[in-house]
Amino acid sequence: MGDAILTPIEKKPASFTASVVGAFGAFAGIFVGAANGSTLLGIVAGFVILAGLAYLAMEVLDESQEKMVRWGLIGLMGVAGFVLGGLPGLVVGLLFGWFFGWLIYWVGEGRYRAHLVPYLTPGQVLWHYTFRVICGAIFVFLITPILVVMPLSFNAEDFFTFTPEMLRFDPEGYSLKHYRDFLQSDDWQQALRNSLIIAPLATLLSVSFGTLAAIGLSQPHVPYRRAIMAILISPMIVPLIISAAGMYFFYSRIGLQGTYLGVVLAHAALGIPFVIITVTATLVGFDRSLTRAAANMGADPVTTFFRVQMPLILPGVISGGLFAFITSFDEVVVVIFVGSANQQTLPWQMFTGLREQISPTILAVATILVGISIALLATVEMLRRRSERLRGMSPG
Amino acid sequence: MKLTKTLMATSALTVAAAGAFAAGHGMSDSMTLVSWGGAYQNSQQKAYVEPYLAMNDGVSATWDESSAEAVAKLRAMNEAGNITWDLVDVVAADAIRLCDEGLAMEIDHDEVLAAAPDGTDASDDFGDLIVSDCFIPQIVYSTTFGYRTDMVPEGVDAPSEICDVFDLETYPGKRALEKRPINNMEWALLCDGVAKEDVYDVLETEEGQDQALAKLGTIKDEVIWWSAGADTPQLLADGEIFMGSTYNGRLFSVIEEQDQPVAMMWDAQVFDLDGWIIPEGLSEDRLARTLDFVKFATDTQRLADQSKYISYGPARASSAPLVGTHADLGIEMAPHMPTDPNNAANTFLYNYEFWADYRDDIDAKFQAWLAQ
C-alpha cells in the first residue's frame, strides 16, 4: 500500500475525537495514577485531561497551529512529569506529550483512514489497528527480557537490580565495571578463549561433513537415504542431556573426555544436522544439468564441485555454518559432561556464575553475546535475501 | 598491594619448606581443584592456591566449580573409570556419603596434615570437626538470617530471635528459606515450643515432622524458596524480602562489601562444615601433588589467612588467634565469625547422623508439602 493516500480524509466530530483520545488518556492514567497513589483517580484525570486537550486542539485552536500545539504538549507533559516523578518522570512525560500530540491529530483529522482502502467498514478499520497493536505486544513480550538485561549490565552495584540511582538517571548509578570484570578476569578470558577455539573448529567440521553428507544424500542413487538422514539428524531430536551422558561415557573410555578434541567433536556432531538441513534445502533449487554440463566440458567432479556447485549453494552452507557456530557457542549441557575444567566455555562459565554468585558480569557478557548473535543473524538474513535475488525468487 | 605483601610474606616463610621437597619430584604439575565458585572460591584462591603456585614453579591449578554436584559427578567418573579431579571441596554431609560409597580416600589425618605450630597433632587441632575419615575440614560456616533494616516496621524492635521469622504480625513481609527441610524443620520446632535438646527426638516421629511442617505452613504464603546461596542476598538487595536465611559469609558480603541496608540475626544459627576430600583412584604422581598441596593449604596460617577474604571460621583451633583484618576493607574479622562469642550466644548444632538416616524420607515429605 505504501504511503499513497487511498481514502480522502475529513475532520471527525469533536465528540468522537475527544472520547477516543480520552480513552487513551484513561489507559495512560492507570499507570501514572498507580505510580502516584490512586489508580482510579488516574483513570478519571487521564480521561478528562486528554479529552479536554483534544477538544481544545481540534475545535478551539486552528488547524494551522498543529506544530505549535504538539510542541506545547510535549513541553507541558514534560513539566508535569518532572513535577510528579523527577528526571525519569520528565522522560516519560516528554514521550507522552509526543505520543498524544500525534494521537490527537491522527484521530481528529481522520488521518488513520488515509492509507486504508475506502470500502472498509469502521469495524474493519478498528480491527486493522487492533491487529497491529497485538503484533506489537507480542514483539514486546519476546524482546523485553533481552532488553532489560542491557541497562542492568551497566549497574554500578553487584546485584541484578535497578537501583534508585539508575532510575534517577544518576551517572553514579551506572558503571562499566562489569565489563571491566569480564575483560580482566582470568576465568572469563579463559572461557572466552575456549569458546573462540572450540566453536570455529566445531563449525569447520560440521560444515565440511554436513555439506558432503547433504550432497551425497541428494543423489538419487544412494540407498537407504532416509534412514541415513534420520540418523545424521538425530542429535537435533534426541534430548541433549541423553546425548551428553552417552558421549561422556563413550569419550571417557576412549580417552577423549576432558580434551579439546572431545568437545570439538561433540559440538561438531550437534552442528552437523543444521548444516545438512540448510544445504539440502539449497540443493533443491540446484539445477543438476549444470554439473552435467561441466562434466561435458571436461571438468572432473572436484573441479565441478568447487567451481560450479559450491558457489551456488554457498548461502545455504554459510547459514548452516552460522547455526552450527551458534549451537557450539551457546551450548552448555554437552560441554559440562564432555569437557573438564580446562575446557570451560562462556556458557558454562555463565551457568556456574549464575548458580553460585549472581553477578552482573553475566549480564555484561550476555549483552556482548546478544550483540554478536544479532550480527550473525543479520548476516544470515542478508545472505538469504541475496540468494533469493540471485535465483530470481523475489524482486529485491 | 596487600595481596602482594601476603604473597611475599608467605613465600618467604615457606621457602625453607619448599627447598626441603625435591621441588616437584614425582609429582604431577597440574591440579584440578573443585569448589563452589564465588567469594568462597576466591578466598581459597587468595589464601592458599596463589601462595602455593608461587612456591612451586611450573605447577598449575584449574578450578572446576562443581561442588554442588560433586557426589553425582564423582559417581559418574568412577563408573567411567576416569577421575579428572584431584581435590574436591564439599560440605561435611557429602563427604560422609562419598566416604561411605568408597569414592573418597580415607586418610590418616595426623600423617597427611600439618601439625599445629605448637606441635599439637592435626587430629587434636581439628578435634570434633573431623566428622569422617575422608574429610579434611577447612571452615566452619553457619546458616543464619539477615533482614533489611529499612523494612522493620516503625515502633518495633528489629528482629533478634529466630521465632521473629514466624511472627507475621509483628514483622510482616516476605521471607526467603532454603528449599529443603534441613534447618527449616529444626527452626520451626524450636519456635513451636520444642526444647533445643529435644528437636531431633521429635523430628524422628511422623507427628514431629507434621508439627514442623504445620509451623512452616503458618508462613508458607510469605516464603520465597531459594536453592542457591546467592539468591537470598539478591532478594535482600532488591527489597523483595524482609528477611531470609543464607550462609553467613554471603550476608557479610552484602552488608560490609556491598553496603546494603541489611543486618545479621545470628540467633539459632546452624553450624556446618566444609572441607576437602581426595577422590579415590588418583594416579601416584597426582596423589603426591594433591597431598603436598593439601598439607600446605590446611596448615594453621593458611586457614587463618582465608578469613581475611571471607567471614567463615577456620576449622583449626590453632588458627583462631591468628584471624586478622579483612584484606580490602581492613575491618576486624573476628566479630564477623560465626564462632565469635557474641554471635554464638544461641547456636544450633546440625546433626549429621540424624540427617544421614532421615534425609530421604523427610525430603520426600517436604517436597510433597511444598507442592500442596
Image: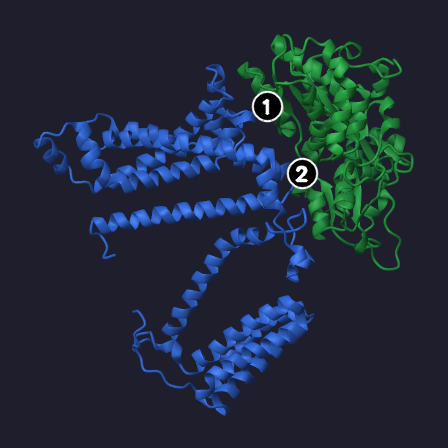
Residue A35 placement (x, y as % from top left): 66, 67
| Farthest left residue in view | A296
Left or right, residue B163 beside residue A356: right
Q: Picture quarter containing residue B212?
A: top right
Query: Which label sits on residue B73?
Result: 1
Q: Secondary structure at mark 1?
A: helix
User: Residue shown at 49%/58% (left/top)?
Assistant: A140
Quadrant of the image containing the N terminus of chain B: top right
Check the residue under mark 2 and report the chain it is in: B
User: Residue shown at 59%/49% (left/top)?
Assistant: A153
Q: From the image, state the color of chain A.
A: blue
User: Residue shown at 70%/17% (left/top)?
Assistant: B293
Query: Do discs 1 and 2 share a chain?
Result: yes
Residue B224 visible in the snapshot? yes
Q: Amino acid at mark 1?
A: Lys
Residue A239 visible in the snapshot? no
Residue A305 placement (x, y as % from top left): 20, 32
- Residue marked by disc 2: B227
Q: Secondary structure at mark 2?
A: loop
- Compare residues A30 and B115 and report the one nearer the observer: B115
Q: Gap between marks 1 and 2, in whole Å?
A: 19 Å
Q: Residues within 10 Å of mark 2 (few under 14, many from 20)?
A: some
Check the residue under mark 1 and report the chain it is in: B
Residue B221 placement (x, y as % from top left): 72, 50
The chain that appears green in the image is B
Q: Residues within 10 Å of mark 1 (few under 14, many from 20)?
A: some
Q: Picture quarter containing residue A243?
A: top left
Q: Tell which circle, 1 or 2, labels the residue nearer the N-terminal end.
A: 1
| Location of residue A202 with respect to A6 vertically, above or below | above
Q: Amino acid at mark 2?
A: Ser
Quadrant of the image containing the C terminus of chain B: top right
Residue A26 placement (x, y as % from top left): 57, 75
